[in-house]
């Protein structure tokens, strides 16, 4: 999440929580300390930003919008198409504008995180995708007849 200077904070967890934390760390290849720090940071962000949650994906953990499958970076990618007009994005998604604004607020607070995810997405073109998925075939998105 961040490479900012750190501070040591001691806390006591119930034994079962400690075991669950170790399992989580193991699944992700993190140290127990890193896992705990990530969970605290995510919890703080959840409490500071409306509608924000965190989920695992194939390429790591991402800030997502509650009640949807969309990551904040995906909403910001869509926002590019609408010149960063939150109301237009909300109409497109058929969401309340406040929910879209929550994504904008989070992206504004953590621009490096969102910019990195957008850059990763932009780096994948069809040639790259077809190397990973040989069965992939291009399709014309604007052809309503499907020809």
Image (cartoon, rainbow, N blue to C red):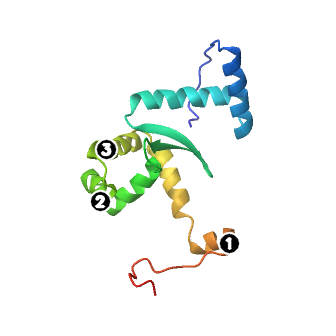
Dot 2, crowdedness within 10 Å: few (<14), some or many (≥20)? few
The residue under the point 53% across, 29% down is: 41
Q: Quadrant of residue 83?
A: bottom left
Indicate which disc residue 116 carries.
none
Cα–Cα span, label 2 and label 1: 32 Å
Relative to residue 70, is residue 136 depicted above or below? below
Q: Is mark 2 on a helix, strand or loop?
A: loop
Residue 78 image point, x, y percent: 38, 59
Q: Earlier in the sequence, mark 2 or mark 1?
A: 2
- Residue 37, compared with residue 101, is above or below; it is above
Asked whether residue 29 is in view, the answer is no
Q: State left or right for residue 78 relative to residue 16.
A: left
Where disc 1 sits, the SS reads helix
Left or right for 77, reference 124: left
Which residue position holds label 2? 83
Badge 3 or badge 2: first in the primary sequence:
2
Which residue shows up at 44% across the image and 45% down it? 111
Disc nearer the start of the sequence (3/1): 3
Q: Which of marks 3 and 2 is in front?
A: 3
Q: How crowded is mark 1: few (under 14 residues within 10 Å), some or many (20 or more)?
A: few
Asked if residue 112 lies left or right of residue 132, the reply is left
Q: Quadrant of residue 24?
A: top right
> Which residue is the site of mark 3?
101
Identify the residue at image location x=60%, y=15%. Answer: 9
């Amino acid at each position: 999440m961040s490479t900012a200077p750190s501070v040591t904070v001691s806390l006591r967890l119930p034994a079962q929580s400690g075991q669950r934390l170790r399992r989580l760390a193991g699944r992700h290849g993190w140290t127990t300390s890193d896992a705990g720090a990530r969970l605290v940071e995510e919890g703080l962000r959840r409490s500071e930003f409306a509608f924000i949650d965190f989920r695992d994906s194939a390429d790591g953990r991402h800030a997502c919008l509650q009640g949807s499958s969309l990551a904040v970076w995906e909403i910001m990618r869509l926002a590019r198409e609408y010149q960063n007009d939150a109301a237009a994005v909300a109409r497109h998604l058929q969401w309340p504008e406040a929910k879209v604004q929550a994504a904008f607020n989070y992206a504004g607070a953590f621009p490096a995180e969102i910019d990195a995810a957008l850059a990763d997405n932009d780096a994948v073109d069809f040639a790259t995708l077809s190397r990973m998925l040989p069965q992939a075939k291009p399709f014309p998105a604007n052809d309503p007849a499907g020809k």
